[in-house]
Image (cartoon, rainbow, N blue to C red):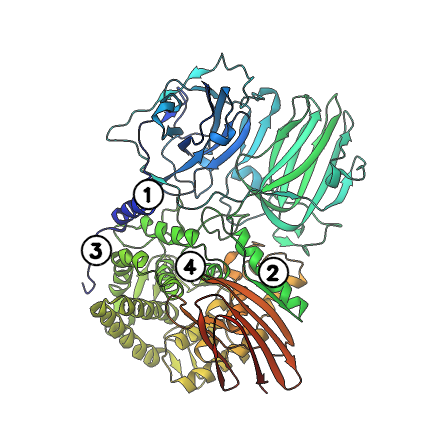
Amino acid sequence: MYYLKFISSSLLYFLIFFSISLGGLQAQNNAQWVSYPTANTTDYGVYHFRKSFTINERPSVLKIHISADNRYNLFVNGQRVSYGPAKGDLKTYKYDIVDLAPFLQQGKNIIAAWVYNGGADKPLAFLSAQTAFYLDVEDDAFAQLRTGSNWKTFQNQAYTPISYNEMLHKERWFYGFYACGPGDDLDGSLYPWGWETLSFDDSNWVSAEVLTFNGGAPWNLVPRNIPFMADHKVKAKKIRSVTGISIPEGFLENAQKITVPANSKASVLIDFEVLTMGYPELTVSRGKGSSVKVKYAEALYEKVNLKAHRDSVNGKTMYGVWDVFRPDGKNDRVFRPLWKRTFRYVQLVIETAGEPLDIISYESEYSGYPYPEMAVFESNDDKLNEIFKICNRTLQMCSAETYYDTPFYEQLSYGGDNRPISAISTYNSNDDRLLREVLRLYPQSKNFDTKLFKSAYPSRFDFDMGTWSLAWIQTLYDYYLMRGDAEFIKPFSEDIDDVLGFFHRHMDEEKGILGTVISRNFVDWSIHEGRLPRSNDKNEITHSALLTLYYAHTLDCASKLYSKLGFLDRAEIYKKESDVIKVAIKKNFWDNSRKLFADNLEKDTFSQHANILAILCDILSEDEQKVLLDNILTNTDLDEYASTYFSFFLFKAMEKTNKEHLFLENLDLWYQFLDKGHTTCGETGFASHDRSDSHAWSAHPSYYLLKFVCGIRPADVGFKTVDISPNLGDLASIKASMPHKNGRIEVTYSVVGKFLDATIILPPNLGGKFKYNGEVHSLQPGKNKIRSRKKL
């Protein structure tokens, strides 16, 4: 074994890291985990907990530590205060720290929470031990608030889950993968309305059951290390179609109620105009015996698995997942799903019985990561501006308690997806807490036989993913270059070595390339069908140029990272192995007649992917790399082409060959998104794989517009200085800015005749260079004005 293990486990490090970085705010463990007596520990269920208490004077601060399995919503005196906990795993299970003082009043108060277990169909990202609730308090004077048998609890029988199978296959509208949890079927006549308020009578509720465990609770509690989600209101924009009723003017804008007559059927198609996510709220009155089916979709459909233009509704079919609300006939009943929904379109399908139903309002509470002020980009090209806008909206839609691959279908954090997402994030925000959290969590999924990580984590997947484990190493290197955060990176060295060790053990030493690898390995979707690299029925991949190159690229990233961290011995080990592989790649896969690298030893399959990685791995000379890039960009006879995902690497190959000016000429897949009415970036750009309308790995053009077109890039590790070298192409003007740890970097470009006028504003303590058309100008903090002769 050539790799070393010289640092203790990352788990131990991060338990220490949490304690130090958050001021030692570990759970005090004075409270007890509780549940509902006789509740099945893992089945679907919704449970309510209440604790009343009296205070003579409201405290200035009253911090609690709160957690639950699977999820909780916390209320104080009827007001929703927080919901969580943030996603994690049992090794580092999160609790939230909440100050209750602002919500308290002199006299009697009530703390109330519901706890939800999604059961067998719970979101795949939920890692669970059993239904449980926990609340501790920092101030011993309020010890009575700690969970124990003094809390009251109630099992809510009003909810029934709508299973995956029913939602996805009853109408046979979708044949792909869905992982976001069941729908809710809520019978309002069984719901304990007002349970969270002071006036509610809980005399028939039972005492909470204190849970006991052999060897300690299964949840190793650590404090939440990301902020609470943004929670602003989002209103729908249009009613697109109506049947069975008339819609009063001002329903959406001014909450003018809709009345559905008794014994009738109606439907209302609501358009939010852009994709959004969160907790929609339907408010109704009357309507005893009625039902409202609430369906959610990214777009309407031409037919099964074929979406229409995203703005098109006439003659189209509304397919999607759904909830059902059955009102009890009283006034101002609010239905809010237990877990977040993603949608552009919402359809209300209504059936009434013997009483009319009043629909009072429909709006949503957005729930996503609260990025501070993000980057901006404006040019004289409106379509290019729109691409930037949909890319950054995609980042927002795919950022919550972890990164999401897709908010509608999965809400999972994949190791490979996170490489482009991290690049977009570091150019759009100085808040790296979410990025560090997904990087930290991922190796906690390690398979202790293979040493590889799961495809996505947190998740309940039972398989690991070799390529995505490699991608995690690549992302660590990218993060280090941008932030210079060596102390965060160093504890992962054992995990880095373990992942690389798996592939090292699978080398064909005679050929110098990877032999047969038996594990799941994904690099991109095929433009035709299936995935790359190709494998057989046993998940075996043998002598694959693509997989070998992906490994070599990761060895290069690891070697450079270790060199910068001062681990020179291992940096040299990985460099030597990479060098051997590169010689073997040229020998085994180069086709001199086509001037391309083949995907296999038979040299009968050729892809952009293998050749992109060959450029990134420096297998050819610099001049030959430029020729190879031109070849794969113009060659119409390849077997596979890069999707919107692998275009991230294609654009890196442009940077590698100093051909960043080609970027603007290769955005066809994103212009197609605009042509189809997308408000976020789709999954691949391929007609053969058009599942998700919002896929974070496709949003990287916003990163490259700032890095290549505006030319803003770090000049050193940690972005202590900046190099600015724009590539405007045919653009006449640009105004853009991006966050930096010292402030904001702002650039303004204007083409005036034969000249480029540039204004660069740098924040305090940031200097650098402006490089354009062979000229180099020094940049100082503050405003810098430069005129250069325009590139021909």
How far apart marks 2 and 3 lie (CA) works out to: 43 Å
196 w.r.t. 312: above or below:
above
From the top left corner, tell me how far across and down residue 280 is, in percent: 61, 38
Viewed as shown, does residue 781 lie left or right of 222? right
Q: Earlier in the sequence, mark 1 or mark 2?
A: 1
Q: Is residue 439 left or right of residue 57?
A: left
Q: Amino acid at mark 1?
A: Gly
Residue under circle 3?
7
Q: Are the residues tagged 2 and 3 within 8 Å (C-beta)?
A: no
| Label 1 with label 2: CB-CB less than 8 Å | no
Q: Amino acid at mark 4?
A: Gly
The front one of 406 and 148 is 148
The residue identified by callout 4 is 416
Residue 307 position within the rendered picture, expressed as x and y whole percent measured from the top left: 64, 54
- Per the model, the C-alpha gap separating discs 3 and 1 is 24 Å
Residue 575's image quarter? bottom left
**536 vs 575, nearest the viewer:** 575
